[in-house]
Amino acid sequence: QVQLAESGGGLVQAGGSLRLSCAASLGTFGYYAMGWFRQAPGKEREFVAATSWSGGGTYYSDSVKGRFTISRDNAKNTMYLQMNSLKPEDTARYYCAQGRSVQGRSMMVTENYDYWGQGTQVTVSS
């Protein structure tokens, strides 16, 4: 069973940037789709971005498109989320997830992911 560990969260002012990382414990990381999700207090967990196993296919929620960039380094078993032009509404706990049998637009669906990390908090002050 894969273990996923997020890092890179923190407190940043509006307009600033952060880079999140998600490290996987198994070398099979490169075989599967990966996604970033977030959950703010009192809200449902929501899709942020996803990448296919190769990194060739990426998807973004409309709320982050043009500001966030998802990427992965399969040699390092690590996925990243570069977050620029951060807004207070981006404040949430960010989770990475791995989907063993997900592809295409189904990568945007929370329920399609099999393994989850513990999350890292991102707080954007106004």
Image (tube, rainbow, N blue to C red):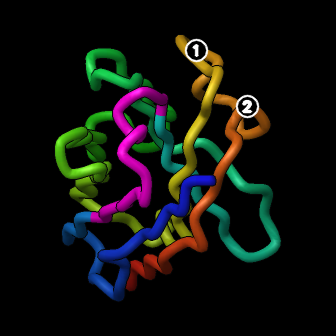
Name the residue type under label 2: Asn
Q: Quick check: can you spot residue 126?
A: no
Q: Is residue 25 magenta?
A: yes
Task: Tell me where the magenta segment starts and ends, as one range.
Answer: 20-33
Which residue does the numbered mark 1 point to in the structure image? Answer: 105
Label ID, residue 29: none
Residue 99, quarter of the rendered image: top right
Q: What kind of element bears circle 1?
A: helix
Q: Is residue 74 magenta?
A: no
In the drawing, does residue 42 fall left or right of residue 6?
right
Identify the residue at image location x=35%, y=16%: 57
Residue 82, quarter of the rendered image: bottom left
* Picture layout, residue 115 above or below residue 73: below
Name the residue type under label 1: Arg
Rendering coords of residue 59 (x, y %): 43, 25
Viewer-nearest of discs 2 and 1? 2
Disc 2: CA contacts within 10 A as few (<14), some (14-19) or many (>=20): some
* Picture layout, residue 106 above or below residue 92: above
Separation of residues labelled 2 and 1 (CA atoms)? 11 Å
Identify the residue at image location x=48%, y=29%: 33
Identify the residue at image location x=44%, y=81%: 123
* Picture layout, residue 42 above or below residue 62: below
Total marks in image: 2
Which residue does the numbered mark 2 point to in the structure image? Answer: 112
Q: Residue furthest top?
A: 104
Rendering coords of residue 4 (x, y %): 50, 62
In the drawing, does residue 59 fall left or right of residue 11?
right
